[in-house]
Image (cartoon, grey):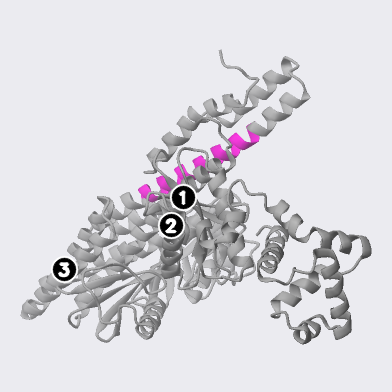
């Protein structure tokens, strides 16, 4: 029989994917048996935590379902060569992906210089289905003008675009309230607008906008392929005299479609960035590099002349921006560059080298860029989910939140981390980059080494395999510095085995604080590298006691008299025991400084300036600053 006196019941409910209503039952049962206010409150807290976890799990499942549906829709588009069939598949896919009441597609008509309702799915109004849209009018007009997605939760009340009576009447007749529109772009121009709409208020999430934008990118490609194929077949029927030219064009289109299907199939079968790079290089007979948003290689089939050259990276970034703005591949001699983007969000670029590309090859490169965008979106989503799981595990280890070491070991094993092997805790800091970027780089670096990383108590921490805390700190600092192009300070602690890592965590934190207090920004060390300071800060050493023994007489005197002998001694040592420089630093008369130092001699004895005692006093002063420093 399940006990409702413990929060464990909520874990059981999560395990069997219970409904939200069932999470109220343990609390209700506790109240019914008069379990006491404290027990009921504890169950309430456990219930709220479990519901938050359930909500996150449900959100991840929805995201995975959306991506799977997008893959399925894209795979279906690649197999279609009829324009009407492609259009129907696009609209059906859009409605299914966003679970919308209706979806529709408006296409630009160059003959009448307006747009018309080309195909709908879920529409019930004949007036709406026959609607023609003047350029610049309605939500679609705004999308065409800005070439960017736009959505509204209340169409008729939104004043961000120009309303017309004909469009508003048709929208009202259809009963639409919330509408999302994304542009279909091809070779730098907008050829239509893809919509998803509901008959009730609905705030479209950023993920939904990105999902529909991704479908629009592939839809424009598939539509263009189908249109080109139809035009080619018509030309073969009507232009026998130009048979060779038409055949060449047909071959080019078929080659483009085949390449696109090949790239899409790679993604559907689980291929990675390296596989896409190899396939594109093979199809185009050259070399290919896949770059991230900072123009650094994610994959490549050969070394390039510009590897590591900042000027070359700047040139490539400019070419990527031009490709993104124009929606097509651009020349950046000796390369051809195609931006990789999801909607208007830049993700990286494909850089082809080896030969100059003709129009067909450029089209293939652009198709490969759209497939790569889909792959990177999925990879980023998976990586973020894995980093959250790894971060949660490290947080649990640091806080000892769960008392079952076997369960923690099993969670770690599933992530490729063997806690029975020696590990080192590394605390890293870099004030010149955002915290999120430092934590993301640390997570990626740790994951590649079967370790863990997390942001905990205002610090970025790593748990990585190793037996040498000093070596691990240096390796982590060097790896993160290469990834961030900024100096990273790192302190190491350990090694430890098993799930109890608090001692190594404390040692790493103290080591980093000591490095920063000593002004050694950009350094990496373990306790053994800090000499006497390391021995003082190390495990089982009474640091506050050491500081009190060295500085106690001065501290007590200052506390009783309200004087500043400690600050005077600190400034005296920091300025090389030079009275003039000390006076200037403290803005005091030299006689006042001398009188204070005489008082220090009375309190500490005549030998306080001798090397041995002076070293201890200076170390104590430094440690006093470390102990007084607020946590980051």
Q: Position of residue 532 (x, y in %)?
A: 58, 60
- Residue at which label 2 appears: 472
Mark 3 or 1, which is nearer the eye?
1
- Residue at the outermost top position: 1
Q: Can residue 162 be seen in the rendering of this structure?
A: yes
Residue density around tag 3, few if under 14, some if 14–19, many if 20 or more, within 10 Å: some
In which quadrant of the rendered image does the N terminus lie?
Answer: top right
Give the vertical position of 136 relative to 106 (above or below): below
Q: Write down the region rendered in magenta.
A: 47-69
Most frequent secondary structure within the magenta stretch: helix
190 up-or-down from 102: above or below? below
Measuring 36% from the left and 78% from the top, which residue is drawn there?
Answer: 323
Is-magenta flag for residue 342? no
Lower sequence index among marks 3 and 1: 3
Residue for badge 3: 283
Check if mark 3's residue and mark 1's residue have beta carbons within 8 Å.
no
On the picture, is 578 further left or further right than 200?
A: right
Q: Position of residue 425 (x, y in %)?
A: 50, 51
Q: Describe the element under mark 1 as helix, strand or loop.
A: strand
User: What is the x, y in percent for residue 316?
Assistant: 35, 81
User: For numbered disc 2, what is the local secondary structure?
Assistant: helix
Q: Is residue 426 left or right of residue 162?
A: left
> In the image, is residue 64 part of the stretch drawn in magenta?
yes
- Please tell me which residue is depicted at 72% across the width and 79% down the height of the picture: 577
Residue at 58% in and 48% down: 539
Residue 424 shows which numbered tag? 1
- Residue at mark 3 to residue at mark 1: CA–CA distance: 46 Å
In which quadrant of the rendered view does residue 531 lie? Answer: bottom right
Q: How far, Cα to Cα, is label 3 from label 2? A: 43 Å
Residue 302, label in figure: none
Q: Is residue 558 above or below residue 110?
A: above
Q: Nearer the viewer, residue 337 or 240?
A: 337
């Amino acid at each position: 029989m399940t006990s409702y006196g413990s929060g464990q019941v909520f874990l059981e409910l999560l395990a069997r994917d219970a409904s939200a209503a069932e999470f109220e039952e343990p609390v209700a049962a506790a109240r019914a048996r008069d379990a006491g206010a404290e027990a009921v409150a504890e169950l309430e807290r456990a219930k709220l935590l479990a519901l938050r976890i359930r909500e996150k799990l449900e959100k991840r499942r929805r995201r995975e379902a959306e991506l799977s549906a997008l893959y399925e829709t894209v795979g279906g588009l690649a197999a279609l060569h009829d324009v009407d069939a492609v259009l129907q598949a696009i609209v059906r896919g859009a409605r299914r992906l966003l679970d919308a009441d209706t979806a529709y597609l408006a296409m630009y008509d160059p003959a009448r210089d307006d747009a018309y309702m080309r195909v709908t799915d879920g529409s019930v109004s004949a007036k709406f289905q026959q609607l023609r849209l003047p350029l610049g009018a309605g939500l679609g007009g705004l999308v065409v003008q800005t070439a960017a997605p736009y959505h509204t939760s209340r169409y008729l009340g939104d004043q961000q675009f120009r309303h017309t009576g004909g469009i508003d009447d048709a929208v009202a007749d259809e009963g639409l309230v919330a509408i999302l529109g994304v542009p279909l772009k091809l070779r730098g121009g907008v050829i239509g607008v893809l919509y998803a709409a509901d008959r009730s208020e609905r705030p479209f999430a950023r993920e939904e906008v990105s999902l529909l934008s991704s479908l629009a990118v592939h839809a424009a490609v598939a539509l263009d392929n189908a249109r080109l194929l139809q035009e080619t077949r018509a030309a073969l029927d009507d232009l026998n005299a130009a048979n060779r030219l038409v055949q060449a064009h047909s071959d080019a289109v078929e080659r483009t479609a085949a390449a696109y299907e090949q790239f899409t199939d790679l993604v559907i079968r689980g291929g990675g960035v390296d596989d896409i790079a190899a396939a594109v290089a093979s199809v185009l007979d050259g070399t290919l590099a896949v770059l991230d948003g900072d123009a650094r290689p994610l994959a490549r089939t050969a070394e390039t002349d510009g590897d590591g050259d900042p000027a070359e990276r700047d040139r490539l970034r400019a070419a990527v921006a031009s490709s993104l703005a124009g929606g097509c591949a651009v020349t950046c001699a000796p390369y051809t560059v195609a931006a990789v983007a999801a909607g208007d969000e830049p993700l990286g670029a494909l850089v082809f080298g080896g030969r100059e590309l003709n129009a067909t090859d450029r089209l293939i490169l652009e198709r490969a860029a759209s497939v790569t965008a889909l792959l990177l979106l999925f990879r980023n989503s998976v990586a973020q989910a894995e980093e959250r799981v790894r971060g949660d595990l490290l947080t649990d280890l640091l806080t000892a939140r769960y008392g079952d070491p076997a369960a923690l070991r099993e969670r770690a094993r599933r992530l490729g981390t063997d806690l029975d092997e020696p590990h080192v805790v590394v605390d890293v800091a870099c004030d010149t980059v955002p915290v999120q970027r430092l934590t993301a780089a640390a997570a990626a670096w740790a994951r590649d080494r079967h370790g863990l990383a997390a942001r905990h108590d205002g610090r970025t921490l790593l748990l990585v395999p190793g037996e040498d805390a000093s070596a691990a700190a240096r390796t982590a600092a060097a790896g993160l510095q290469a990834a961030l192009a900024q100096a990273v300070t790192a302190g190491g602690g350990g090694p430890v085995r098993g799930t109890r890592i608090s001692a190594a965590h404390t040692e790493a934190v103290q080591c980093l604080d000591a490095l920063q207090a000593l002004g050694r920004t950009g350094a990496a060390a373990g306790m053994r590298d800090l000499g006497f300071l390391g021995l003082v800060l190390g495990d089982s050493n009474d640091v506050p006691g050491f500081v009190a023994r060295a500085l106690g007489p001065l501290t007590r005197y200052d506390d009783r008299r309200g004087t500043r002998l400690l600050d005077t001694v600190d400034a005296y040592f920091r300025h090389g025991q030079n009275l003039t420089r000390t006076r200037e630093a403290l803005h005091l008369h030299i006689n006042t400084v001398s009188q204070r130092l005489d008082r220090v001699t009375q309190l500490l004895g005549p030998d306080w300036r001798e090397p041995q005692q002076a070293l201890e006093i200076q170390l104590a002063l430094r440690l006093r600053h470390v102990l007084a420093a607020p946590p980051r």
